[in-house]
Amino acid sequence: MTGTPYRGRLAPSPTGLLHLGHARTFFIAAERAAAGTLILRNDDLDTQRSRPEFVDAMLEDLAWLGIRWAEGPQPGGTETGSFGPYAQSQRGHLYAAAFQQLREAGFLYPCICSRKDLLSAPHAPHAEDEDEPLYPGTCRARNPKSDEAASWRLRVTDGEEIHFHDALLGPQKFIAGRDFGDFVVMRRDGVPSYQLACVVDDAAMQITEVVRGRDLLRSTARQILLLRALGHPIPAYAHVELMRNEQGERLAKRDAARSLRYLRESGLTPQEVREMAFAGIE
């Protein structure tokens, strides 16, 4: 995508308050987009945990930090930009079209395995990627034309190496069938997976570089396969090191004392939060 005007994005999920680790990633994303365009996308596909109050807090806290975006939802309920709507919950028709394209091209097969089945399989989930256990291929032989209630997986080529150069972490390599297996693109309830929705939206919004946490490196390998299957250009990637608490655990939205809202209400300035974000946990 050399020569294409830079388009970066912030893509938080409104399932809790943003924390210090988010701030570091978003500061880096904003800095890398300084000479281009920064987009804010509301990744609110998790209907069970996404809440309007977290959307409001997200917009307020990002604005308080001094991060400015040219496209996406704005404080006060307005929206700017030509690639909207910028909330994933309103973009279902795009995901459905991509799913149909993949299915008709023969990339997908139905899977009736439950999460309990997967967690009891011989392959354990990866430590930092527990949302997607390594799939043992149980349903690979199922009829791809079946209309039964099932989730749908993209079949990977075992042994295929996926390479990409990360702008922050250097060369990366993942092997399909070893580092990740066939992965879900559409759940049985009709909700697209993070992998599919992210790929469709990044392509539709013409994102040229994806900046996000290191924990999503393996997701990037999966998404490159999806981008290829859908015929979309592959953006550049920059994965930010995770922030961890005193116990060495990565920060999570349940760490209320590290939330931007808590730090803000404690009287810290945006500059002090920035210094904390780049210095690590004090």
Image (cartoon, grey):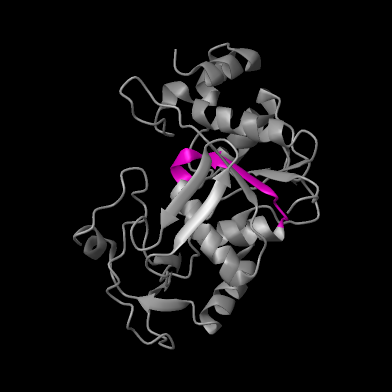
What is the total number of numbered labels drawn onto the structure image? 0
Asked if residue 86 lies left or right of residue 185, the reply is right
Question: Residue 274 at what x, y percent from top left?
Answer: 60, 19
**Measuring 37% from the left and 48% from the top, which residue is drawn there?**
129
Q: Is residue 169 above or below residue 181?
A: above
Q: Is residue 176 above or below residue 210?
A: below
Q: Is residue 46 visible?
A: no
Give the magenta range: 205-216
Q: Which image quarter holds the C terminus?
A: top left
Q: Is residue 9 above or below residue 48?
A: above
- Residue 248's quadrant in the figure? top left
Q: Is residue 271 above or below residue 184?
A: above
23 falls in the magenta region: no
- Residue 154's quadrant in the figure? bottom left
Question: Residue 185 at what x, y percent from top left?
Answer: 47, 66
Q: Is residue 169 visible?
A: yes
**Measuring 57% from the left and 71% from the top, which residue is drawn there?**
229
Asked if residue 209 lies left or right of residue 179, the reply is right
Question: Residue 244 at what x, y percent from top left?
Answer: 40, 26
270 or 118: which is nearer to us?
118
- Residue 1's quadrant in the figure? bottom right
**Measuring 37% from the left and 87% from the top, which residue is drawn there?**
143
Asked if residue 52 lies left or right of residue 113, the reply is right
